[in-house]
Image (cartoon, rainbow, N blue to C red):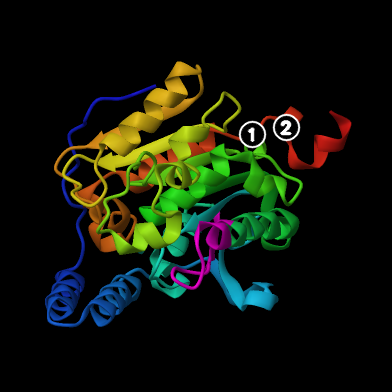
Amino acid sequence: MVTQPMALPRRLPFSRSVYGLLSRVLLVATLLPLGGCEATLFAGLNATDQHHDISERHAIPFDPAHGLALDVYAPAHASHAPVVVFFYGGDWARGQRAWYRFVGTALAAQGVVTVIPDYRKVPQVTMDGFMQDAAEAVAWTHAHAGEFGGSADDVFVMGHSAGGQIAALLATDARWLGAYGMRPAQLAGFIGLAGCYDFVPVPPDDKDMIAAFGRSADQQRLGQPVSFVHGEEPPMLLLQGTEDHEVEPSNAISLAHAMQLRHEDVTLRLYPGVGHGAVLFALSRPMQGDAPTLQDVLDFVLLHPTPRSLALGDIGER
């Protein structure tokens, strides 16, 4: 299903002091170098996004050999709850899982166990490296979901921007999860926020993308999720702002079209007037009025449990 652009709700009421804090954070962020700017912005979002009745566990190793860890945000007293593995963006070259605490707390407060892993970045690795890390994080989540009140049979992958590409490729190219005895159709769903899905050819001056995917079109297609849609993907929710000038809306439209051609379950939501960061930041409490991202994600998760016949524990019986 593809839905048309919708009218956005007004900004939710929030205290003036919080808006004042966020405004100051954004003002200071514009005066800092890129790294400091990003860190300050995310610190401000996290500081204004406190929730009760959730548990947090940080820096849990999932790949000690590469020094990789993850954070888990879980509803208090969760039992067989849906699980979302969220991959953050940053041009495959930047980012820290701690910056995205607001994503974990927002979803956990609504009953969703949320796992936020790190992954190796370019130029330390190419696509093969960070995709291996992402698949390993999903495999770890499947194996340990019950320890946090989650269901191993109800695991979603989700990502924003470059993280959307990573999550989408896990959901389409079977070789990544296949290395861990899993396959895309076993996922409960994929949720993409302004992800990179159809980007060949990569602009020759985009150093991060060239470092990740190579210079030739053949190499680049190996990282392009739309290249691998073949009819056995999990359900997809694609959220995209129409005013996104970082990742063109054509990426989401193209992936939705590829899914539709194979009669697969896909929902595309186009948010008028919403930019690249806003579709993500709308998960934070002070910015939830900017786009209905949180509600759309929650609705999708509740409507898409993994079919029992494809449950991860049942593969040996098929």
For residue 303, above or below residue 110: above
Query: Which of the pair 117/22 is nearer the observer?
Result: 117
Q: Which residues are magenta?
A: 113-131
Type of amino acid at the residue the image marks with label 2: Leu
Type of amino acid at the residue the image marks with label 1: Ala
**SS of the residue at dot 1?**
helix
**SS of the residue at dot 2?**
helix
Residue 279 visible in the current orientation: yes
Residue 240: name its quadrant.
top left
Residue occupying the point 16% across, 73% down: 26
Q: Label 2, on which residue?
A: 310
Work out which quarter of the rendered image holds the C terminus and state it.
top right
Residues under numbered marks 1 and 2 in contact, where contact means CB atoms less than 8 Å apart: yes
Q: Is residue 148 magenta?
A: no
In the rendered image, residue 34, in percent from the top left (x then y), is placed at 23, 77
Residue occupying the point 35% across, 63% down: 208
Residue 317: name its quadrant.
top right
Q: Label 1, on which residue?
A: 185
